[in-house]
Image (cartoon, rainbow, N blue to C red):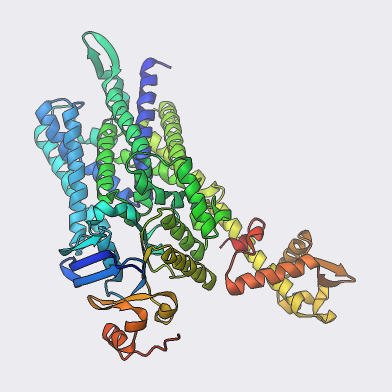
Amino acid sequence: MTSAQFEIQLIACIVAIACAIPGTFLVLRKMAMISDAISHSILPGIVIGFFITHDLNSPFLIVLAAITGIITVVLVEYIQKTGLVKEDTAIGLVFPILFSIGVILIAKNANDVHLDVDAVLLGELAFAPFDRFVVSGFDLGPKSLWIIGCILIITVILLFAFFKELKVSTFDAGLSASLGFSPALIHYGLMTMSSITTVGAFDAVGAILVVALMIAPAAAAYLLTNDLKRMLLYAICFGIFSAISGYWVAHALDASIAGSITTMLGLVFLLLYLFAPNKGIIAVLYREKQQRTEVSLLTFLLHLKNHTEETERHVNHLNEHINWQKVRSKTVLELALKNNMIKFDKNIVSLTKKGEKFTSQAIDYIITNQDAKIEHMKDDFFLFRG
Amino acid sequence: MSNKIAVQIDDLTVAYNYKPVLWDIDLEIPEGVLMAIVGPNGAGKSTLIKSILGILKPIAGSVRIYGKPYKKQQALVAYVPQKGSVDWDFPTTALDVVMMGTYGSLGWIKRPGQKEKKAALEALEKVGMLPFKNRQISQLSGGQQQRIFLARALVQNASIYFMDEPFQGVDATTEIAIINILKELRKAGKTVIVVHHDLQTVPEYFDWVTFLNVKKIATGPVKDIFNDDNLTKTYGINYKVSIQE
């Protein structure tokens, strides 16, 4: 691995981490689309800043672009507040207009410079190592590494300082306001940070892929955990994994680095969407199937409880009485036997003591909907988990 | 009940998009009452609470908590929002939600520590939710979620409690458990203000009531003013409730 390759991967990883942190809160606040809006509408800010400074890595550019990001958020909220259009419509109105202003500005004035529409949309990660940060003759590494590195450090400091404020205002804005933590202040703080991160990541991965780096790791992490700190940690890990693996995929295929990173993010999400232990599609389908069987089991146990006459309880009569197919009856019988809820006596089925207790408790729960008594049953049966 | 005024509201007018939802409210809530705010849908009950707490900005009028603006008295006030106002799929546990009640006394930046955790556990115990402390909040039933919210208010150890429909969507046992805790709070000299929907239970649960329908209709002790006349004025139809003593 050459030093340029190492630098590209390092930049990609830092961009991924810097994006995953605000991204997690955007996903939890159901504001994923706002990051899309910001990433596009900061373009005029970048272009105007570029005309003034003639340097794509100037801090002034970042400030200007961040201001454009905030203007986007304010405009979206203003249009939405009039009540004439919904939020998604407001987003759809604001960012294409700002973005197209940026596109026109580039086409009119910057035809002969590094800034072009391709670079804006997809970034130029591969070229990042060429632009060095040199101080009095010393080469301190790529400029974009310094920029995104500084942004990451600020993000991490803010995250540690205001974690509890971010959490409470995201979960319950009303409570947050009543406790004296202004949700508006935190909201605009998060928006400012998202804008700054977007600008910093922009040069490396471009406007479209910044969104993926913010949203996909957080969305994937959300499927895996019920703990906010872990969600942040997982999102960061997914970001890093996609950045490195994406780089090598691009290397092998001789394709766009940013495109490959995003593809890897998509794959990570897809895998978790399918296989996440509790929230994944397969786990959900399995749970639904188990619940169906458990409802059948309860129906069957109730039948046994309500009928003392032997004809009703004979194995051969069960199919016709409860009107089930053989396969289903077999599954239900096996489940009941496995849990020691029924016993056989010359092909006559009857409830065991455990079965009796289970049935009355379950019925009690279904009628009263009080789950204090059935807490211990939640571990074994999906049915009682609400 | 003492003679002190816990909450003083003067000429309060609140509007959404320039449409007034509360008109010129004057209201004094004495210290130590357990008060219901009743009124039809859209009467501005939640709006009234949110304006008192500074969540909504009124276009006119003032609110004072023990004689001072809310911002200065924040520590004296606990708030239980409507259960439906938050996303219960948020990745957090019951204990963590209750801990949020301690954030106000911590202020900006400071993190909760052992002391806050202990207080949160005690509050969970009080509402009978200690066994569920590590449960993810979406895995709780509606009644359990409401108890968690109540515990979060208890942990604030406030003087005035505002609750927005704490009985909505909870089972009978939880409702009784909640009202018993509210009555205990009143016994301890706290002031409790509840947005309430079920008129039948007003005389049984509360000792003070405010009738609200955009304007204030009446406020005072339940035994004096909870009558058909005020109910009819508030709900606009001929109302008859049987008051059980």
Q: Is residue A345 left or right of residue A166?
A: right
Report the front residue among B203 and A167.
B203
Q: Is residue A177 left or right of residue A310?
A: left
Residue A162 at x, y = what percent? 34, 40
Residue A88 at x, y = what percent? 27, 56
Quadrant location of the C terminus of chain B in the rendered image: bottom left
Is residue B207 at all visible to an observer of this figure?
Answer: yes
Q: Is residue A92 above or below residue B109?
A: below
Residue A359 at x, y = what percent? 71, 70
Q: Is residue A218 above or below residue A371?
A: above
Quadrant location of the N terminus of chain B in the rendered image: bottom left
Residue A62 at x, y = what percent? 20, 32
Report the front residue among A321 and A368.
A368
Q: Is residue A314 left or right of residue B31?
A: right
**Quarter-wise, where is residue A64 in the image?**
top left
Residue at left 36%, top 58%? B159
Report the front residue among B170 and A344.
B170
**Quarter-wise, where is residue A112 in the image?**
top left
Is residue A36 at all visible to an observer of this figure?
Answer: no
Q: Is residue B200 left or right of residue A367?
A: left
